[in-house]
Amino acid sequence: MSPVLVATTPDDTAVPLGPTLSIFDPVYIGIDEFGHPVTVPLIYRNLLIGGEPGSGKSALLNAVVAHAALSLDCRLCLLDAKRVELGQWRRCADAFVGPSLPDALALLSRLQIMMDRRYDYLEECERRKVVPDDRYITPYLIALDEFAYYSATVGKKAQREEFSELLRDLVARGRAAGIIVVAATQRPSSDIIPTSLRDLFAWRFAGRCTTDSSSDIVLGHGKAQQGWTANTISPTNPGAGLLIAEGGTPQLVKVAYLDDATCAAIARYAATLRNTVASKPQPRVAA
């Protein structure tokens, strides 16, 4: 069972704040077609989310960010061109980038430098990856909504290409350094996400798609011919989609939905935990 964090009041009275999560725990994302819970291990992995507007992409993205926000062993970097899909988590994040490609490039460049320094440290310690309870390396979740805005819509071609190259490096090399990338877009075609980047995502979720080819772009070539296509999902069933892991078989899932009020409440609680507890070492007691 997860530990319970306690805060200390001015009169030294211990106040339990509730159990916390860990980014090393499997992340609950919803239920399968039999009603069983579905979880995904995100540490050392990355997740690509695709689907038409209203298919449930943001619901899955917010479910993942909620878990990371409640995990005090994880830090957040958020990129959201619309600002409102991930805006409620702003107070929990180390960095929040809105509709600004230069700001996005600056953030990814800093993360790339941090990643290289982490590998210097791991090499010096003769270690291969970040582990739970690591004293010096905290995992980072990079959550990105509206991928196409940064990679194909605004700025100059050289800037857009630099964005894709920086993100590709973080996805390709960042896993062992504790960097997790979760990206959402409507149709991750090669003009939006280069194939060399798209193919690096181990976990993929395809919400409702309008064509078999769009579904294959998310899940992988030939999946529709094998009978796995998000085109068969009803447009009146938002949040339903196909989840696939690296080398695995697609699984039909219904993503958990956090409405605005619930999402905001979790975000406020997570911010409170981080501001009043994470900034100062606190004793842990068993639940």
Image (cartoon, rainbow, N blue to C red):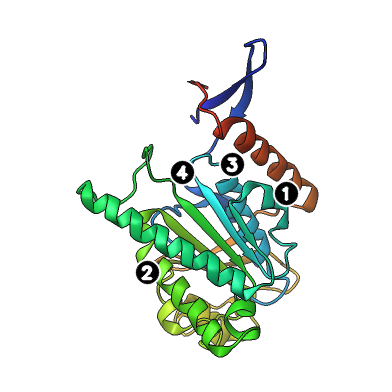
Tell me which residue sits at (59%, 46%) in the image: 69
Q: Which amino acid, by three-letter code, is at mark 1?
A: Cys
- Which one is closest to the eye, mark 3 or mark 4? 3
Q: Position of residue 211 (x, y in %)?
A: 61, 86
Q: Secondary structure at mark 4?
A: loop
Q: CA distance from mark 3 to mark 1?
A: 12 Å
Relative height, residue 76 to residue 71 (above, below) = below
Residue shown at the point (45%, 73%) measured from the top left: 166
Q: Amino acid at mark 4?
A: Asp
Circles 3 and 4 in contact, beta carbons < 8 Å? no
Give the residue at mark 4.
Answer: 25
In which quadrant of the rendered view does residue 177 lie? Answer: bottom left
Say which element carries label 2.
Answer: helix
Q: Which residue is mark 3?
A: 70
Q: Position of residue 58 (x, y in %)?
A: 67, 63
Q: Which residue is mark 1?
A: 263
Q: Residues within 10 Å of mark 2 (few under 14, many from 20)?
A: some
Q: Is residue 223 left or right of residue 253?
A: left
Residue with the mark numbered 2: 172
The amino acid type of the residue labelled 3 equals: Leu
